[in-house]
Amino acid sequence: MLTTADKRATFKKLHESGCFIIPNPFDVGSGRALQHLGFKALASTSAGFAWTIGKADNRVTVDDVCDHLTALCAAVDIPVNADYEGGFAVEPDKVAVNVARGAKTGVAGLSIEDSTGDAANPLFEHKLAVERIKAARKAIDADNSGVLLTGRCEAFLWGVQDLKLVIERLQAYSDAGADVLYAPGIKTKDEIAAVVKAVAPKPVNLLIGASGLSLQEAGDLGVRRISVGGSLARMAWAGVMTAAKEMAEKGTFTEFANGYPGGELNKMFK
């Protein structure tokens, strides 16, 4: 197994050129499966993990997440980037405490977002949002951990379709110490290219979903890193719910024919 320091050095190197995918496992098994397929790094998913413990997204605790990250990082030999939501606190000093704790799980990177969870006021006030990134940066640097910090602007996910606002925030997060910038929800090539240009030379993470872009297309726009959020978890749940509904509603079991071969899973995990 690689050491945590090795994983962090590898993760940093991945951000220097090209475009790579960090798929989002939702538990240890899916993490090991993705490593088996040859991915060079992974990213946790707040939603995907929450569903595995019977909770809605954004309803998990910092204890839940740190336990999950510790297990995931220990189970794979590649870097893990943490979806660390909003740092599980509002005040910058409390964000710093939680980020320091998150860094100790073995992650190679973690992200801090600026959403409040309040639909009426979806984003933290600009100054507070910046101070939260500064606090996370300070916490990471306190022990020279080498964890990469991603600053996220959640505006598009909360219906605030203001690219100028997003860019201003990402630039401020960059100035505050974020190593990577991320605006989940941007979709068009023009939006993506504008964000990449605005924060250059720092790398940009792109959430692939509705945009439908390929790895090559995203790379051509200057994107450095692609994640898929809860998409893999939703695919897994689609299979479970389809088969379970058939049993519950029809008393039949035909969907099991579409399951992944158990023998192949055993070979992968032995």
Image (cartoon, rainbow, N blue to C red):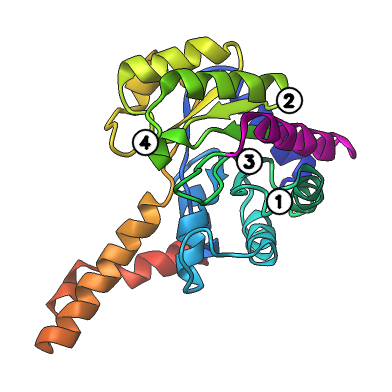
Location of mark 1 (residue): 1
Location of mark 4 (residue): 208
- Give the left or right position of residue 216, taking residue 109 as reference: left
Query: Does the magenta-highlighted stretch encompass residue 235?
Result: no
Image disc number at residue 112: 3
Residue type highlighted by circle 4: Ile
User: Which mark sits nearer the N-terminus, 2 or 3?
Assistant: 3
Q: Which residues are magenta?
A: 124-148
Q: For marks 2 and 3, give the CA distance.
A: 12 Å
Query: Does the magenta-highlighted stretch encompass residue 140?
Result: yes
Residue type highlighted by circle 2: Gly
- Residue 177 placed where, x, y %? 73, 25
Q: Dots 4 and 2: beta carbons under 8 Å?
A: no
Residue 213 vertical position relative to residue 50 in the rendered view, above or below: above
- The residue most toward the bottom is 251
Mark 4 residue crowding within 10 angstroms, few (<14) / some (14–19) / many (20+) = many
Residue 176 vertical position relative to residue 71 in the rendered view, above or below: above
Mark 1 residue crowding within 10 angstroms, few (<14) / some (14–19) / many (20+) = few
Image disc number at residue 177: 2
- Residue 155 placed where, x, y %? 46, 34
